[in-house]
Image (cartoon, rainbow, N blue to C red):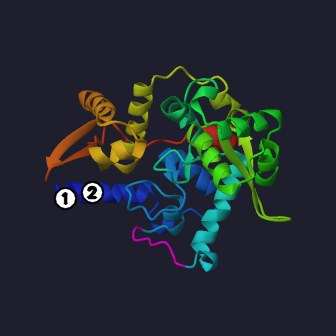
Amino acid sequence: MEKNLNHLEQLRDHILRRIPERRVETIEDAYYFIEEVGFCHLMTDGRDNMPSLYVAVCGRRDVRLPRNVQSDAETSLTWHLKDELARLGAAFYAKQLQNIPTFIALDLVPYFYALYSCSPAFSPQKFSSDAIAIYRSLRRESPQTTAQLKLSSGIEERKRFDKALEELQLAMQVVMSEVRYVPKFTYVWELAAVRFPEQLRKPKRISRQDALRHLITNYLATVRYATARQAQCLFRCSPAETGRALEQLESQSLIRTFAESNTVLLIADEDRLPPRRIDLEKASAW
């Protein structure tokens, strides 16, 4: 088993760009990286068993976030790439996974939407009154800066505004579409269905269980191995839901499971579940 895991770590080095020759240096590199892994956290050190744009920028395994991020070149580049990816709409910027800033490849957005959104259309009864006010304000005018949105929604108290906005982000109803630094720093907010109409205005009819199975498949194809607990916590699903998805993957011989020290280890089959491949035609068009 130890020899097998060492081999899988070497595969991870390539997929997650933890080697100098594959590190992310440009906006094109960042786009290709997200397309290769499907989804990734923005600014983490990779110890949570998730792809990380910051780790890919560093191009090495043993990464630690610096104390002074303002003067760190790798951190600054990661933030710059985040701003550009969001501005270009090259990937969906959200907080779906563990409430951590995350980029999602556009082909996976309908699956995340099926798993996390309240329904195919906005349902006021599913949201707080503050969230409804922000949503309706963006329906009248979108996009808006943070200051504009606070004023137009009538929610100027920062704590209330942030809580309501996060509620809408987690349900994939609102997305940050731009970061502005002049004349002062601000985010720009937009209805997700307006920003990504192809993925969200007429979402595919995907069941919650099918969406979870598809996303776990993508996750394991990327990280190559994980524990059942990690998969469950990552997607915030019940043990029963996660268990059904894993049983289906195992029945299709896409993964193998091993029990070690009261931990169920999931390993992607090297032949039946290869890493994601980039759609070169789509990538060239972008």
Local packing at callout 2 (Cα closer than 10 Å; few below 14, some 14-19, many 20+) is few
**Element type where label 2 sits in the image:** helix
Q: Quadrant of the C terminus?
A: top right
Q: 97 left or right of 190? A: left
Q: Which amino acid does label 1 sit on?
A: Lys
Nearer to us in this view, 114 or 88: 114
Q: Do the residues labelled 1 and 2 touch (CB within 8 Å)?
A: yes
On whether residue 168 falls in the magenta region, the answer is: no
State the quadrant of the N terminus.
bottom left
Could you say whether the residue bearing mark 1 is in a helix, strand or loop?
helix
> Dot 1, crowdedness within 10 Å: few (<14), some or many (≥20)?
few
Q: Give the labeled residue for mark 2.
A: 7
| Range covered by the magenta-colored residues | 61-67
Image quadrant in which you'd find residue 180: bottom right
- Mark 1 — residue? 3
Residue at 72% across, 37% down: 133
- For the stretch drawn in magenta, the main secondary structure is loop
Res 231 quadrant in image? top left
Residue 119 screen position, x and y as percent? 56, 25
Q: What is the three-letter code of the residue carrying label 2?
A: His
Identified at 51% across, 69% down, the residue is: 58
Q: Nearer the viewer, residue 142 or 156?
A: 156
Where residue 118 appears, as percent x and y from the top left, is: 55, 29
Give the residue at x 67% y 26%: 201
**For residue 218, side relative to residue 124 (left or right):** left
Q: Is residue 22 visible?
A: no
**Res 188 visible:** yes
Q: Where is residue 253 in the image (x, y as percent from the top left)?
A: 25, 31
Is residue 66 found inside the magenta-colored segment of the image? Answer: yes
Q: Where is residue 172 drawn, in percent x and y?
A: 60, 37
Residue 55, compared with residue 214, is above or below; it is below
